[in-house]
Image: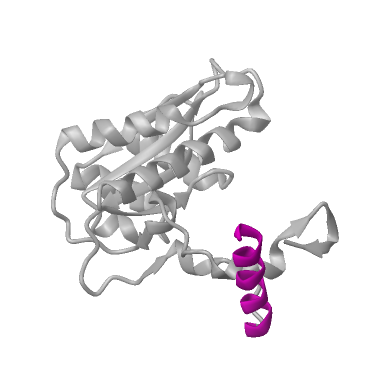
Amino acid sequence: MKGTKAFAALFALLLAGTPAFAATAAPQGDVFSRVTARSFTGKALPLATLRTLTAAAFSAPTAVDQRSLEFFWVTDRGVLGRLKTASPYATALDTAPAVLVICANMRDTRIADLVAFDAGAAAEAVLAEAAHLGLHSVPMSLAPVKGRIEGSQKALGLSRDIVPQIMVAVGEKAPDAVSGASAKRHDPARVHLNTWKNGL
């Protein structure tokens, strides 16, 4: 009986010309609910929220478990303005109530070439947790552009061995924000199984 029902379901899919995986429900979870926003209401975030987002960043894996990242939350408009001077295309800095600058402490780093991996993993964890909290976010690169790195070091009063990698702006998006939902960007043509020629 079970086999008959399974065959009937498969036959119905074949008749519809629909791949079996397409019949599953839409992806669920915090990563899929994430929305990129580049303008925010400016409403301040509680310190408890910043601590939760920081905990998410610390939960991310790091290469050879080197754990050399330093996290700087910026909420002061003056400091945000100086960061914007260092990274003029980072328009989210104009309105974001809080920006996390993720840096590599090179004194504690064993494999310097992998700090970008560490910072990216931490940033992604923050993006996912922000979505879980009902907030919006956008990542903005600093490394490897020398001028952005040095400018943000100056803005934050950092020594040369604390190297900014990436920023993440977090807050409530403005009603007219230019935004995009991450779940809508799936491209099956860029997914491969075992070899270049096989799709998934």
Q: Is residue 54 above or below residue 98?
A: above
Report the predominant secondary structure element of the magenta stretch: helix
Image coordinates of residue 146 in percent, x first then y, are 56, 44
| Snapshot quadrant of residue 143 | top right
80 vs 153, left or right, is: left
Image coordinates of residue 117 in percent, x first then y, are 59, 37
Q: Is residue 98 above or below residue 50?
A: below
14 vs 118, left or right, is: right
Assess whether residue 4 is covered by the magenta stretch: yes
151 vs 79, left or right, is: right
Q: Residue furthest front?
A: 1
Residue found 21% across the figure and 50% down from its top: 97
Image coordinates of residue 118 in percent, x first then y, are 55, 33
Residue found 70% across the figure and 64% down from its top: 190
Image coordinates of residue 178 in percent, x first then y, are 34, 72
Give the magenta-colored segment's residue range: 1-16
Considering the image in quadrants, where does the N terminus appear? bottom right
Residue found 17% across the figure and 61% down from its top: 41
Camera-side residue of 200 and 4: 4
Total marks in image? 0
| Snapshot quadrant of residue 12 | bottom right
Residue found 56% across the figure and 47% down from its top: 145
Assess whether residue 119 is covered by the magenta stretch: no
Q: Is residue 17 above or below residue 90?
A: below
Considering the image in quadrants, where does the C terminus appear? bottom right
